Amino acid sequence: MMIKTTINNMDRRGFLRRVGIGTAAVGVAALPGCSPKTEVSADEYSADTSDIPTDKMTFRRNPSTGDNVSLLGYGCMRWPTVKGEDGRDGEEIDQEMVNRLVDTAIAHGVNYFDTSPAYCRGRSEHATGIALSRHPRDKYFIATKMSNFAPSTWSRQASIDMYNNSLKELQTDHIDYMLLHAIGMGRGMDEFNARYIDNGILDFLLAEREAGRIRNLGFSYHGDIKVFDHLLANHDKYKWDFVQIQLNYLDWHHAKEINSGNTNAEYLYGELEKRGILAVIMEPLLGGRLSKVHDHVVARLKQAEPERSVASWAFRYAGTHPGVLTVLSGMTYMEHLTDNLRSFCPLKPLTGDEMQFLYDTADLMMQFPTIPCNDCKYCMPCPYGLDIPGIMLHYNKCVNEGNVPESAQAENYQKARRAFLVGYDRSVPKLRQANHCIGCNQCSKHCPQSINIPAELARIDRFVEQLKQGTL
């Protein structure tokens, strides 16, 4: 397919007129948990309803161990939940649905499952182990992590206990892909040394790889680029089998613009490619943000590929890079899984024109900035009870739907005002809204996207008050 990439030669208003959207509709002001059932958009899914073949999955070969890994990997951070015994949403993992999702994934060739001791409030490994253990062990690869974030887990024994508990919860005697979790977060090199070097845990994991109980050893990167560069500079010493990075078409060139604490994916992938280290991709959808884009971006993507979902563009983009071993997706719903299976059974790589089309789309998206929240819930729980990701995701949703008016003179002001305020009260309970933030900043240091969370919550609260008082 040939795609004309003319957006660079067209002003914003001209483009919006061309896709049939008025400028008034897009005016804008400039511990990980699982997912309860929420409203999902039809644009997230493909219009294709045909059967998905069970023998067409695209695989990539890992030369370290000879593994043939499915290009679609299952991220187990967002397992579906049901109400707990106390009636609260999201308190219990829906094990029956997890089993169904895993069964469907494996039946269609998915064989890489990525979890962590920290995911789903510490319950993901257990649920994942139950679901996977119902299948032959040679049908899947398990990836988990040394998630020793808390100083109480930095001792050698505490970290070893975490590792042994992962083996127990996952009902296995070996880990196929083991990661040092989220290196670069917190205090950079000082924290990395405390978590992995001073206590001898990296040496322990290297010994476990030598003994065969870990088949591949790598790390996931968030935060301080000095730590990433340090570990790659020592590749000859550690012989990393793979590295997990955040990569998508928006972060390729714009990650640092979105947040100065981030690193452009072009650099991360390029450094791995130089050394022949396989990349495992996280956040291909930026925590769902690239499946819930601004209405005018939806129109642009649908105009190019009417039958494909908005999300499929991001997954095909990540999978097109030849140095990628697998692309992780946290598929909470069966609809997410089936849509992604259509993208990878088999993968139809993007052409050069299509890649440029997405880079131009990313440039356009930067004119309508949302908060870079990926709903990872690393900021939770808030000591004062705020629903931090819920607040920011509601704001982003309203930006994408054109319901963040610049002023009371905006053409759609009354409609947008009602949509924002009514939606806010429906999606975030009043006692958990932004006006209850006291600025303690316990959240920001845990954010992989380096968001200044108290500042964003204060900005949203000011906007809400202006809408309520009619002073915008």
Image (cartoon, helix red, strand yellow):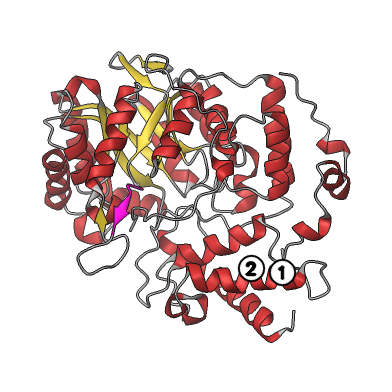
Residue 342 on image: x %, y %: 49, 25
| Residue 261 falls left or right of residue 467 | left
Q: Residue at x 23, y 21 (%)?
A: 139
In the picture of the structure, the residue carrying the numbered disc 2 is 419
Check the picture and name the quadrant holding the C terminus: bottom right
Q: Nearer the viewer, residue 238 or 67?
A: 67
**Label 1: how many Cα within 10 Å (few below 14, some 14–19, many 20+):** few
| Residue 177 falls left or right of residue 254 | left
Q: Nearer the viewer, residue 216 or 294?
A: 294
Q: Nearer the viewer, residue 227 or 431?
A: 431
Q: How many marks?
A: 2
Residue 151 appears in the picture as rendered: yes
Residue 450 on image: x %, y %: 50, 57
Q: Residue at x 39, y 38 (%)?
A: 334
Q: Please state the extent of the stretch shown in magenta in the rendering.
A: 78-82
Tag 2, which secondary structure?
helix
Q: Find out whether the residues at labels 1 and 2 contact each other: C-beta distance under 8 Å.
A: yes
Residue 63 lies in magenta, yes or no? no
Residue 359 appears in the picture as rendered: no
Tell me: residue 25, above or below residue 288: below
Q: Residue furthest bottom?
A: 469
Q: Amino acid at mark 2?
A: Ala
Query: What's the mark number on residue 415?
Result: 1
| Residue 227 falls left or right of residue 48 | left
Residue 284 on image: x %, y %: 51, 38
In space, the residues marked 1 and 2 are separated at their CA atoms by: 6 Å
Residue 454 on image: x %, y %: 51, 72
Tag 1, which secondary structure?
helix
Where residue 251 sits, quadrant-wise, is: top right
Q: Amino acid at mark 1?
A: Lys
Tell me: residue 278, above or below residue 458: above
Query: What's the mark number on residue 115?
Result: none
